[in-house]
């Protein structure tokens, strides 16, 4: 099917020194391996502007939201910005798992970058910027609506603007329908009801429309079949309003790449085409893959054909040579004036929840008072995405500033609740505690107020916690937990400080939050 040379057949080429920490897709000799991002950047949409590629992804209840990533080659990606500081609704002061910012679309039009994003309980929102790494406008509500999802703007050659969107069955009672509505060119209002373009019960859960006009054809690309088991469908017509014909252009086939779900069709300056999509990997989130595209009889066939099926590739030639390696940020020594872009709070946040300026090289968390130790429901949890299939995280904790009864530590949040290891302040000392949905277990009495904590994440999502011994080395907790995905979101690893009783929680200081690749034996 494809006219791109299989990298396995490429003549000898020179390898590069590629960092293995924590994950890199760049093989270093002109090829890449999927996934190109082994992290939870759900519902990716991508555009090319000049020689730069810009990606945006869902962020749900987490803030800052709408992460923006940059690449020069579609393989090596760097987290560059966030388009929104807060979810634009006051109810997100609390953790609302599975709600908030769903699948966005990014476009460039009229000298500006535009992001459209849905909040399925509130409506369709829009923001714009002169440059993706610059300041984004305060988002405005284009249309209040319940159950409208996956908006995509489209400006036709005559300057007329349109909005395509799908429906969330859970909110609207509709599914497998794509609707097109006329829109003001400034993206401030819709101009009519428009038309339902198609209803496809044979493509279960059809959603995520992305509209393109290529060589006189209108194309709408959609994922169908559901997140863990679906496929990609291309619809095309000579008229934007249809009728449309359809073709399945990517499916799992004989590979282990389930889905493959929602994504973006991108052209390069050299005339080649590529498709980025996500794969659902449970607690590891929705990780991003890159497929070559070959146009056959006017259809964008993706991946590689085997036995009459277009299925994902595991390794391929890089779209653009000469760049990389690069990965989204992970580790943090807290030496900057601001938190790294990799960090997100679990709800709309306040600046006084944390400080980087009160102690050099430390992140200071100011605890909040809550009625539960389920960190997955705690707005002040500061976390980041799992960055690889397996990894190790260590962090130093100084809890001398904590108040009696408060708890601080290292946590994993997921759909089954939270798991953590930490210190609970007790007089002039602390006790080492392990938290899980079953409650809190005391691991040691009267430990020091300064310690190093650790969690090891295994390829199956298994979690093993550890802590520094008072004498030397590390001790592992002799229990293994299991991370789970949450509401449309992967598990997260991060830091917390909380109080379960009223009073002044004080503060907890964290230093040297570091990811390590999986190694055996673990470092002492």
Image (cartoon, helix red, strand yellow):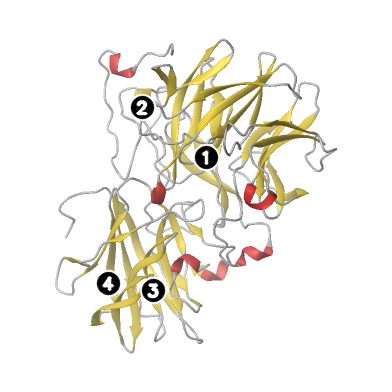
Q: Which mark is residue 278?
A: none
Residue 175 point in image, percent of width and height: 64, 41
Q: Which mark is residue 451?
A: 4
Determine contact: label 4, label 2, CB under 8 Å.
Answer: no
Determine whether the residue tagged by mark 4 lies in a helix, strand or loop.
strand
Q: Which residue is mark 3?
A: 408
Determine whether the residue tagged by mark 3 lies in a helix, strand or loop.
strand
Q: Which residue is mark 1?
A: 226
Answer left or right for 41 relative to 143: left
Q: Which residue is mark 2?
A: 254
Q: Is residue 309 above or below residue 186?
A: above
Which tag is nearer the camera, tag 1 or tag 3?
A: 1
Residue 37 point in image, percent of width and height: 42, 39
Determine whether the residue tagged by mark 2 lies in a helix, strand or loop.
loop
Tell me which numbered mark, 1 or 3, is placed earlier along the sequence. Answer: 1
Q: Is residue 129 above or below residue 441?
A: above
In front: 40, or 401? Answer: 40
In front: 13, or 163? Answer: 163
Tell me which numbered mark, 4 or 2, is placed earlier along the sequence. Answer: 2
**How far apart are labels 2 and 3 at the CA level?**
46 Å
């Amino acid at each position: 099917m494809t006219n791109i040379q299989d990298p396995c057949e490429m003549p000898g080429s020179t390898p590069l020194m590629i960092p293995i920490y924590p994950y890199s897709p760049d093989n270093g000799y002109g090829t890449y391996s999927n996934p190109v991002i082994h992290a939870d950047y759900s519902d990716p949409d991508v555009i090319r502007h000049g020689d730069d590629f810009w990606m945006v992804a869902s962020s749900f209840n987490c803030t800052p939201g709408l992460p923006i990533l940059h690449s020069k080659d579609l393989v090596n990606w760097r987290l560059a910005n966030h388009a929104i500081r807060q979810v634009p609704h006051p109810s997100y002061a609390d953790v609302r798992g599975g709600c908030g910012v769903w699948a966005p679309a990014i476009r460039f039009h009229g000298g500006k970058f535009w992001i459209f994003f849905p909040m399925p309980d509130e409506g369709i929102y829009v923001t714009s910027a002169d440059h993706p790494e610059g300041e984004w406008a305060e988002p405005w509500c284009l249309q209040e609506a319940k159950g409208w999802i996956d908006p995509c703007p489209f400006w036709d050659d005559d300057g007329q603007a349109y909005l395509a969107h799908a429906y969330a069955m859970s909110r609207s009672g509709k599914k497998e329908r794509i609707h097109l509505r006329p829109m003001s060119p400034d993206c401030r209002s819709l101009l009519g009801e428009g038309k339902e373009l198609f209803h496809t019960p044979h493509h279960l859960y059809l959603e995520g429309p992305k509209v393109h006009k290529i060589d006189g054809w209108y194309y709408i690309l959609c994922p169908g079949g559901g997140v863990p088991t679906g496929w990609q469908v291309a619809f095309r017509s000579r008229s934007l309003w249809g009728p449309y014909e359809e073709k399945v252009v990517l499916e799992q086939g004989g590979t282990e790449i389930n889905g493959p779900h929602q994504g973006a069709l991108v052209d390069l300056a050299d005339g080649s085409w590529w498709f980025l999509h996500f794969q659902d990997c449970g607690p590891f989130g929705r990780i991003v893959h890159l497929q070559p595209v070959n146009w056959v009889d006017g259809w964008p066939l993706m991946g590689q054909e085997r036995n009459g099926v277009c299925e994902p590739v595991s390794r391929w030639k890089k779209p653009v040579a000469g760049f990389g390696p690069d990965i989204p940020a992970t580790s943090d020594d807290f030496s900057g004036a601001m938190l790294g872009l990799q960090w997100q709070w679990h709800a709309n946040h306040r600046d006084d929840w944390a400080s980087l300026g009160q102690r050099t090289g430390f992140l200071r968390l100011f605890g909040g008072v809550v009625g539960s130790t389920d960190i997955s429901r705690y707005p002040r949890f500061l976390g980041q995405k799992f960055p690889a299939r397996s990894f190790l995280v260590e962090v130093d904790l100084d809890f001398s500033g904590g108040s009696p009864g408060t708890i601080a530590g290292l946590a994993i949040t997921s759909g089954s609740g939270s798991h953590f290891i930490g210190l609970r302040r007790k007089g002039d000392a602390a006790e080492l505690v392990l938290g899980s949905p079953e409650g809190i277990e005391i691991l040691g009495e009267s430990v020091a107020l300064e310690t190093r904590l650790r969690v090891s994440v295994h390829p199956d999502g298994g979690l093993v916690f550890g802590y520094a011994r008072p004498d030397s080395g590390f001790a592992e907790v002799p229990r293994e937990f299991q991370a789970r995905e949450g509401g449309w979101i992967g598990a997260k690893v991060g830091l917390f400080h909380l109080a379960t009783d009223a009073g002044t929680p004080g503060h907890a200081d964290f230093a040297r939050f570091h990811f390590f690749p999986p190694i055996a034996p673990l470092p002492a």
